[in-house]
Amino acid sequence: DLLLSNSCIPFLGSAEGLDFRTMLLDEERGRLLIGAKDHIFLLNLVDLNKNVKKIYWPAAKEKVELCKLAGKDAHTECANFIRVLQPYNRTHVYVCGTGAFHPLCGYVELG
């Protein structure tokens, strides 16, 4: 209904079939961070599809292999699903992902 009424603009990055898990709204700078499967997106709130920045952050290959050997599904479980997006300071966001059952965290500079 929203698409038919032209009252929304869909995010085209979702066509990649990514599994979106978490969001962080930065109203002060007019942007939205989205955590997905192996990716972090930084979107402009005015136009979600304009100047999209994307960080590819997969789990280490050896961790993915260990995950598969443990009987987990390679497509739905053995990836780095971004679960935490937390403001750290004015320039960085603290980010954590599942890392194919070997969690990892880091800081992303937003500049």
Image (cartoon, helix red, strand yellow):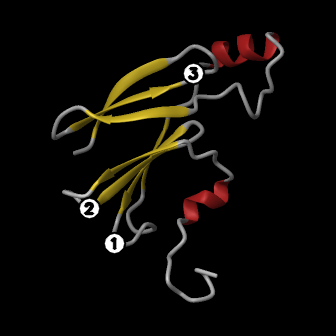
Q: In this view, does 59 lie above or below 76?
A: above
Q: In which quarter of the image is the N terminus?
A: bottom right
Q: Which of 62 and 75 is in front in this view?
A: 75
The secondary element bearing badge 2 is classed as loop
Q: Which residue is drawn at 58% across and 24% down?
A: 59
User: Mark 2 highlights which residue?
Assistant: 30
Q: Is residue 51 left or right of residue 82?
A: left
Q: Residues within 10 Å of mark 3 (few under 14, many from 20)?
A: many
The secondary element bearing badge 1 is classed as loop
User: Mark 1 highlights which residue?
Assistant: 46
Please report whichever mark, 3 or 1, sits nearer to the chain's N-terminal start: 1
Q: Is residue 72 above or below residue 15?
A: above
- Label 2 and label 1: CA atoms lie apart by 7 Å
- Label 3 and label 1: CA atoms lie apart by 32 Å
Q: Nearer the viewer, residue 90 or 57?
A: 90
Amino acid type of the residue tagged 1 in the rendering: Val
The secondary element bearing badge 3 is classed as loop
Label 2–label 1 contact, CB within 8 A: yes
Please report whichever mark, 2 or 3, sits nearer to the chain's N-terminal start: 2
Measured from the top left, where is residue 77 in percent x and y?
72, 27
Q: Is residue 41 above or below residue 75?
A: below
Q: In this view, does 3 lie to the left or right of 104?
A: right
Q: Which residue is drawn at 52% across and 41% down?
A: 39
User: Mark 3 highlights which residue?
Assistant: 99
Q: In which quarter of the image is the C terminus?
A: top left
